[in-house]
Amino acid sequence: MEEKSQIKHEYIDGEIYAMAGASDAHVTISLNLAALLRSHVRGRGCRVYISDMKARIETKNKNKFYYPDVMVTCDKRDQETTNYKSFSCFIVEVISDSTEAFDRGDKFADYQTLDSLQEYVLINPKWQRVECFRPGDNGL
């Protein structure tokens, strides 16, 4: 259904949520970062994706699909799927007033269930702030 839809939707445990459009600053930041990352990972077997590629979060109790603003995967298993990626190592969300609580809360908690995730970045264009989250030695 999503492949034929004119509107993007995130899927969270059986519920479907329509995605809103993004501001000029949001899109510009995402595109600039994706372009820089693409140059950085070239030749390393990694792929950079922008907001039209879904990230799949699947655990025993969860089945969710999100559209991160930017994500990177270096896992060969992700080459087997064309409409989503399950083994992202780097995810970026450009936050807005309407998405900040979700990006910092439930979505962040869901992304943390990805064993492959090495870094989660939140960019706040309103405050010109970048926050980077990485697992510590204790795995937290």
Image (spheres, helix red, strand yellow):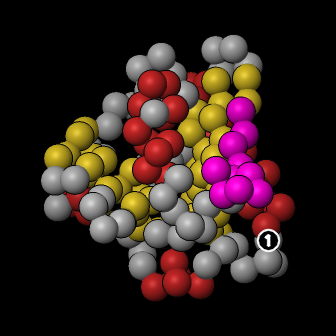
Q: Position of residue 90 (x, y in %)?
A: 65, 56
Residue 18 seen in render: yes
Along the line of sight, the residue nearer the viewer: 23 or 9:
9
Q: Which amino acid does label 1 sit on?
A: Arg
Up-down relation of residue 77 to residue 64 (above or below):
below
Point out the residue furthest to the front here: 138
Q: In this view, does 75 lie to the left or right of 82?
A: right
| Residue occupying the point 42% across, 75% down | 82
Up-down relation of residue 112 to residue 30 (above or below):
below
Q: Is mark 1 on a helix, strand or loop?
A: loop
Q: Where is residue 118 in the image (x, y as percent from the top left)?
A: 68, 59
134 within the magenta span: yes
The part of the chain drawn in magenta is 131-140
Q: Characterize the local packing of mark 1: few (<14), some (14-19) or many (20 or more) Cα atoms within 10 angstroms.
A: few
Residue, disc 1: 42
If the image is split into quadrants, where does the N terminus sit? bottom left
Q: Position of residue 78 (x, y in %)?
A: 51, 78
| Residue occupying the point 72% across, 80% down | 45
Along the line of sight, the residue nearer the viewer: 4 or 44:
44
**Does the magenta stretch mainly form a helix, a strand or a loop?**
loop
30 within the magenta span: no
